[in-house]
Amino acid sequence: MPTPFSEERAEQISRHLKLLTFLFVIVPIVLLVVFIEFRFRSIEENLPNHTPSVRDEARRELDTMPWHPVTGQRLYVPAYSHVYHQKGEPYLLTVTLNVRNTDVDNEIVVTSVRYFDTSGKELRSLLQKPLQLAPLAATEFVIERDDKFGGSGASFIVEWKAGTEVNQPIVETVMVDTSNTQGISFTASAVPIRETVSDGDSSIIPENVAPAGD
């Protein structure tokens, strides 16, 4: 039969073991989780936010063309502000429009990026000034998940020009949602709807003014 002393000693040992377990197991795990979370947030905050107001040397806003444009395109890019699921309920998505200069030697200029809703109504322009993309540079434009105005048939019209013959840029949209336990993501590629050639004017043509010959 255990004595009161041995029971008290056993309880002390048990408390010490619990304290040691807390100090050397639980606390380090909590600190590690906090550190990892902090590290991830720090990395996310340091990632470049490629909104139209944030540029770098590879993506410079322009007031005038750096050369006489000789080639270019007007592109239609499908976008899906939402898709339908279950009983036809809308499933909201974040849309990222990505424009990639695929030419290794020459820059291109993105002259216009406009966002349209399902009915074909222009919602807004996403580019305040034409944007020069260095060789192999890319830029992004994001339609946030809570922006519901585009709808399932939303689209972008993107226009670009170059001062020499170049590889055609890759322009596509990426639709993503990870808010639920089951995420969704898919892409859509641009479709050329017009080949554009400048009439020789080196100034920037406002996007709401049709170029000569349109």
Image (cartoon, rainbow, N blue to C red):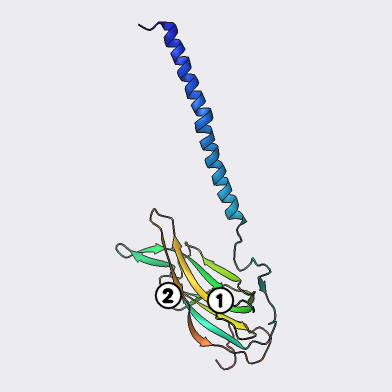
Q: Secondary structure at mark 1?
A: strand
Residue at 70%, 82% (x, y): give it. 66
- Which amino acid does the dot numbered 2 rest on? Thr
> Which quadrant would residue 187 be assigned to in this image?
bottom left
| Coordinates of residue 127 in the picture (x, y in percent) | 60, 74
In which quadrant is the C terminus drawn? bottom right
Numbered label attached to residue 152 = none
Give the residue furthest to the left. Answer: 87
140 in relation to 179, above or below? below
| Coordinates of residue 132 in the picture (x, y in percent) | 65, 76
In which quadrant is the N terminus drawn? top left
Q: Residues within 10 Å of mark 1 (few under 14, many from 20)?
A: many
Residue at 47%, 24% (x, y): give it. 18
Pick whichever, 178 or 163, lies toward us: 163
Left or right: 114 with respect to 63? left
Residue at 45%, 11% (x, y): give it. 8
Mark nearest the camera among 1 and 2 is 1
| Coordinates of residue 125 in the picture (x, y in percent) | 56, 74
Pick whichever, 51 or 168, lies toward us: 168
Q: Secondary structure at mark 2?
A: loop
Left or right: 10 with respect to 104? left
Q: Residues within 10 Å of mark 2 (few under 14, many from 20)?
A: some
| Coordinates of residue 83 in the picture (x, y in percent) | 38, 67
17 in relation to 53, above or below? above
- Which amino acid does the dot numbered 1 rest on? Val
Give the residue furthest to the bottom. Answer: 213
Residue that badge 2 annotates:
118
Pick whichever, 50 or 170, lies toward us: 170
Residue at 55%, 41% (x, y): give it. 34
The first of marks 1 and 2 along the sequence is 1
194 in relation to 132, above or below? below
Numbered label attached to residue 113 = 1
